Image: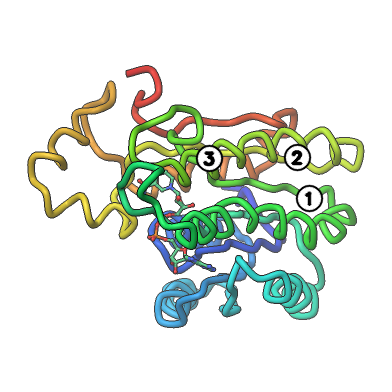
């Protein structure tokens, strides 16, 4: 069978984490070279090791998506190493303390907005000039909480909502350059980011019942949606947000 990303060069931010790693492994399986960009050396290197184990092509580039220089150097290293860039997956993100907005520390607001929203502006700002040479593709990872308000996650709600409109904005600005820009909006997915909730059995069981399919999703299910949007099968799809939430939005 034809591999769906044969010969493509991809960058996956947060590629050491749950959704990022699943996407990196899936992309590699489909023939892409993968640059794993993560702040955490151990998990980023582990993703690369898992890809090399399967004879795939991958490189770890330590990256802080909050910092302009770090993103610029990520794009530069990718182009130097692989000769260009076809696919950018803006996936790195963090959760927040569950408190009312009036109790949220300003520095936490800044950290969540920078990591979850400014990072996407920076990723696009520095990658788009390379993507323009390639009919490139961008997939931004938003959230169900970018489409729906919830108590006690003000910064996360604001950042992830912003990701969706920034996606639409970029789709409009770069459509004429043949760059497609889409978002995915995952519901509750079993990764480190929701580990805190696991400790509370009642909350965990309530969360797992909070969608039509009555279960928590796994990172591979989000990776499949990201792969679809990044592949030529989605050639006429841009500016879209694809929910991967087991029916969480409609619940
Ligand atoms: N798990 C869920 O339920 C869920 C739901 C909706 C959206 N999301 C989103 O999916 C994305 C991936 O999250 P995940 O669930 O795989 O979590 P995760 O914690 O497993 O992975 C996040 C990765 O991002 C990295 N990272 C954090 N800050 C960074 C920075 N400043 N620079 C570079 N890398 C950084 C972490 O080291 C980690 O490897 C996030 O944007 C998250 O908001 C997750």
Q: Residue furthest front?
A: 102
Are the two marked residues, 1 and 3, in contact with CB atoms closer than 8 angstroms? Answer: no
Give residue 185's position: percent from left, percent from top: 49, 36
Q: Would residue 168 appear left or right of 242 to someone viewing this image? A: right
Q: Which residue is mark 2?
A: 180
Are the two marked residues, 2 and 1, in contact with CB atoms closer than 8 angstroms? Answer: yes
> Which is more toward the observer, 42 or 145?
145
Q: Is residue 91 above or below residue 42?
A: above
Return the disc, 1 or 3, that comes first in the chain's sequence. Answer: 1
Residue plotted at (77% across, 40% down): 170
Residue plotted at (37% across, 32% down): 150
What whole-number distance in Å separates the C-alpha atoms at marks 2 and 1?
Answer: 7 Å
> Which is more toward the observer, 108 or 53?
108
Q: Secondary structure at mark 2?
A: strand
Q: Would residue 210 appear left or right of 31 to someone viewing this image? A: left
Query: Which numbered circle lies on residue 158?
Result: 3
Return the disc, 2 or 1, that comes first in the chain's sequence. Answer: 1
- Figure quadrant of the C terminus: top left
Residue plotted at (31% across, 41% down): 217
Give residue 231's position: percent from left, percent from top: 65, 43
Return the disc, 3 or 2, that comes first in the chain's sequence. Answer: 3
Q: Badge 1 local density, few (<14 within 10 Å), some, or many (20+)?
A: many
Which image quadrant shows ligand 1? bottom left
Query: Which numbered circle lies on residue 136?
Result: 1
Give residue 188's position: percent from left, percent from top: 32, 40
Q: Is residue 237 above or below residue 45?
A: above
Q: Badge 3 local density, few (<14 within 10 Å), some, or many (20+)?
A: some
In this rendering, the label closer to the viewer, 3 or 2? 3
Q: Badge 2 local density, few (<14 within 10 Å), some, or many (20+)?
A: many
What whole-number distance in Å separates the C-alpha atoms at marks 3 and 2?
Answer: 24 Å
């Amino acid at each position: 069978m034809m591999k769906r990303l044969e010969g493509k060069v991809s960058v996956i931010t947060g590629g050491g984490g749950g959704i990022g790693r699943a996407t990196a492994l899936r992309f590699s399986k489909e023939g892409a070279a993968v640059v794993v960009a993560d702040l955490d050396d151990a998990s980023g290197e582990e993703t690369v090791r898992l890809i090399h184990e399967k004879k795939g092509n991958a490189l770890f580039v330590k990256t802080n998506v909050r910092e302009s220089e770090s993103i610029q150097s990520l794009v530069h290293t990718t182009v130097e190493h692989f000769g260009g860039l076809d696919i950018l997956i803006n996936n790195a993100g963090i959760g927040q303390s569950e408190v009312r907005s009036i109790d949220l520390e300003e520095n936490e607001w800044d950290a969540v907005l920078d990591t979850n929203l400014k990072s996407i502006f920076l990723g696009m700002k520095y990658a788009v000039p390379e993507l323009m040479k390639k009919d490139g593709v961008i997939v931004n990872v938003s959230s169900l909480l970018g489409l729906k308000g919830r108590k006690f996650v003000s910064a996360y709600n604001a950042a992830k909502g912003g990701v969706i409109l920034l996606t639409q904005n970029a789709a409009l600005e770069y459509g004429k350059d043949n760059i497609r820009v889409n978002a995915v909006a995952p519901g509750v997915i079993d990764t480190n980011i929701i580990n805190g909730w696991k400790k509370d059995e009642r909350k965990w069981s309530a969360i797992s019942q909070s969608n039509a399919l009555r279960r928590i999703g796994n990172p591979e299910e989000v990776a499949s949606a990201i792969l679809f949007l990044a592949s030529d099968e989605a050639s006429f799809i841009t500016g879209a947000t694809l929910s991967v939430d087991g029916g969480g939005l409609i619940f």
